[in-house]
Image (cartoon, rainbow, N blue to C red):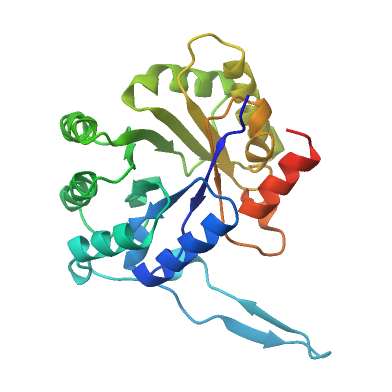
């Protein structure tokens, strides 16, 4: 059985930097990339460099939620999507994450829906449609996506915590029909939370007629479901280009390290 597809979530904040990041992701083995269009409204600050008594220098960045956010009118949507389409050869999962699900989009829901519509009409390969989108608007987006042969990620992102394994299994089963792949990402508070993701995926992998799914979490232990995805029936695994000390504490895994782990574990 082939390993899950690896999708690198792009984290840069300009179109040019995002295109460059996508190119590096392709070189390092990504099957596809997630364009987080909402991040294009962020302004990345300068890192603060601190030197200790021994002359060792470390740089730190403020939390992303403290970064400056541009007004929705400051970004030319059509021009940006066209430049991303031209510059990224890999299949793209297009997402405009709302604040309610951990994203940074500064506009209202009507403006966000309009951007998703534009992305679908541009013939993007995949579009991420949260199941929290109002039913009428989501139905129209799904119809447009199917007409454009654009595959759908039906997603839910819980920023407050992680439900039980049983609740996650129910969530996947009930929402699988809303997309080609159901994606769930939670926030773990401890390793017991992380085990709920593992338990849910393991159970789903043994069931017949289970929708395709991608389960993960943010926080210490959240990377377990990514690292062991080949044994957990995962359809896709989200990785990052970040390569920093204690990245696993954030529940993230570097795309190259992910592939190395799969080889070492003989997946």
Q: Which residue is found at the position 47% from the left and 24% from the top?
A: 212
Q: Is residue 71 above or below residue 171?
A: below
When asked about the image quadrant of residue 180, the answer is top left
25 and 193: which one is in front?
25
Residue at 63% x, 39% y: name it. Answer: 226
At horizontal 50% and vertical 82% (from top left) the residue drawn is: 46
66 up-or-down from 218: above or below: below
Q: Where is residue 178 in the image (x, y as percent from the top left)?
A: 32, 25
Foreground of the two, 99 or 154: 154
Judge from the rendering whether residue 19 lies leftward or rightward of residue 192; answer left or right.
Answer: left
Place of residue 112 in the rendered image (x, y in percent of width and height, measured from the top left): 22, 51
User: Which residue lies most toward the right here?
Assistant: 54
**Please, is residue 211 above or below residue 93 in the view?**
above
Q: In this view, does 204 lie above or below 194?
A: above
| Left or right of residue 56: residue 84 | left
Q: Answer yes or no: is residue 77 visible.
A: yes
Q: Quadrant of the C terminus?
A: top right
At a point 46% along the width and 22% down the height, the residue shown is 172
Could you say which quadrant of the image residue 5 lies in?
top right
- Camera-side residue: 191 or 40? 40
Describe residue 265's horizontal placement relative to residue 187 as left or right.
right
Most distant residue in the top direction: 208
Q: Where is residue 88 in the image (x, y as percent from the top left)?
A: 39, 58
**In this image, 237 relative to 178: left or right?**
right
């Amino acid at each position: 059985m082939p390993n899950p597809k690896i999708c690198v979530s792009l984290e840069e904040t300009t179109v040019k930097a995002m295109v460059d990041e996508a190119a590096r992701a392709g070189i390092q083995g990504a099957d596809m990339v997630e364009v987080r269009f909402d991040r294009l409204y962020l302004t990345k600050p300068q890192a603060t460099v601190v030197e200790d008594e021994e002359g060792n220098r470390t740089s730190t960045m403020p939390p992303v939620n403290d970064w400056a956010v541009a007004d929705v009118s400051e970004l030319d949507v059509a021009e940006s999507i066209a430049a991303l389409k031209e510059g990224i050869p890999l299949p793209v999962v297009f997402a405009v994450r709302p604040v309610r699900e951990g994203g940074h989009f500064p506009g209202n829901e009507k403006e966000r829906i309009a951007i998703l519509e534009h992305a679908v009409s541009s013939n993007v390969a995949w579009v991420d449609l949260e199941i929290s989108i109002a039913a009428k608007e989501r139905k129209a987006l799904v119809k447009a996506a199917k007409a454009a042969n654009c595959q759908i990620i039906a997603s839910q992102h819980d920023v407050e915590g992680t439900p039980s394994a049983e609740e996650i299994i129910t969530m996947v089963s009930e929402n699988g029909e809303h997309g080609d792949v159901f994606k769930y990402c939670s926030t773990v508070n401890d390793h017991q939370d992380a085990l709920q993701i593992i338990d849910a995926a393991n159970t789903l992998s043994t069931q017949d007629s289970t929708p395709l799914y991608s389960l993960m979490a943010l926080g210490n232990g959240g990377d377990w479901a990514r690292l062991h995805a080949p044994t957990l029936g995962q359809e896709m695994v989200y990785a990052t280009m970040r390569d920093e000390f204690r990245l696993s504490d954030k529940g993230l895994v570097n795309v190259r390290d992910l592939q190395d782990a799969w080889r070492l574990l003989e997946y």
